[in-house]
Amino acid sequence: MDDPAAHKLQLYELVMQNGRSASPYVWRTRYVLAHKGIAFESVSLGFGEIAAAFAGRFKTVPVIRDGDTLLAESWNIAEYLDRSYAQGVPLFGGASEIATTKLFDAWLHVEILRRLFRLYALDIHNAARPEDRAYFRESREKRMKGRTLEEFTADRETRLPAMREAFAPLRAHLANYPFLGGAVPNYADHLVLAALQWVTSVSTLPLLAGDDAVLRAWFGRSLDLYDGAGRDSRMRPLFE
């Protein structure tokens, strides 16, 4: 394998009109890179550019280029980086932790990510680069069985209370620990942070209540991690 120190890794990521990264899966990789202390070069792509950038090999980001290695899918990337950059802080404590975190990720996908898209699909469209909006609308509305983005998100305010309640298991855990990983953050923290960074990249509707003290405290601690790698003046409000 190439010597990791001999080159700078490239991260291909989806960006919005203001240049901010806006994919929960890209943000997972950003946090892994920060956790491991790996320097990287960002390669910005719009929605309509991803397939062409890789000659059709990949249709989604994140994608990393690490020397001769070109790799997609956030979980594959996380495990690869943990193996290949062993000199950094370990991301996983072993196979058992990986398996448990994948179970957590399955819950997160069903109970959080899918429901967030129902709230913010139109916001994503509006925050995208102008040249990407037609592609985003056409491709996503095909999945919505003929509904427009406007119709798909029309009732989002009525869905917000149930969406907030879906975070209850995280609040219960974080009432006893500073991070989902316990005393220190782990990949479970990165998964949730990535979802919330996605929201703060596009949202015109604050996701969480202003008095959500537990999640507010955890989010603040988490934004300070890795020399404040998650903080960005372009973030939109997460709390009312």
Image: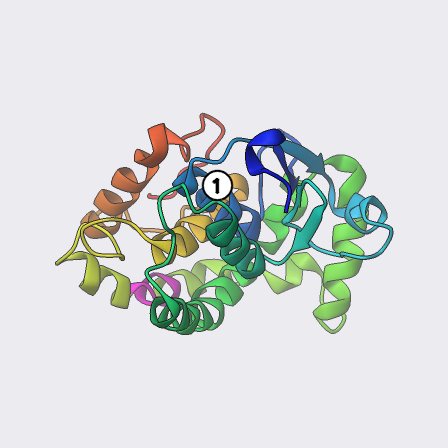
Q: Is residue 106 visible?
A: yes
Q: What is the secondary structure assignment of the residue under circle 1? A: helix
Q: Residue sitting at 53 percent across and 60 percent down?
A: 75
**Dot 1: within a 10 Å radius of its alpha carbon, few (fewer than 14), some, or many (20 or more) residues?**
many
Kind of residue at badge 1: Leu
Is 48 magenta? The answer is no
Q: Residue sitting at 74 percent across and 74 percent down?
A: 145
User: Left of 127 or right of it: where is 238?
Assistant: left
Q: Position of residue 146 (x, y in %)?
A: 76, 70
Q: Residue sitting at 80 percent across and 38 percent down?
A: 131
Magenta span: predominant SS is helix
Q: Position of residue 142 (x, y in %)?
A: 77, 67
118 or 215: which is nearer to us?
215
Quadrant containing the C terminus is top left
198 or 72: which is nearer to us?
72
| Range of magenta residues | 162-167
Q: Position of residue 16 (x, y in %)?
A: 64, 37
226 or 106: which is nearer to us?
226
User: Left of 98 or right of it: where is 14?
Assistant: right
Find disc 1 in the rendering and name its residue: 33
Q: Position of residue 168 (x, y in %)?
A: 26, 66
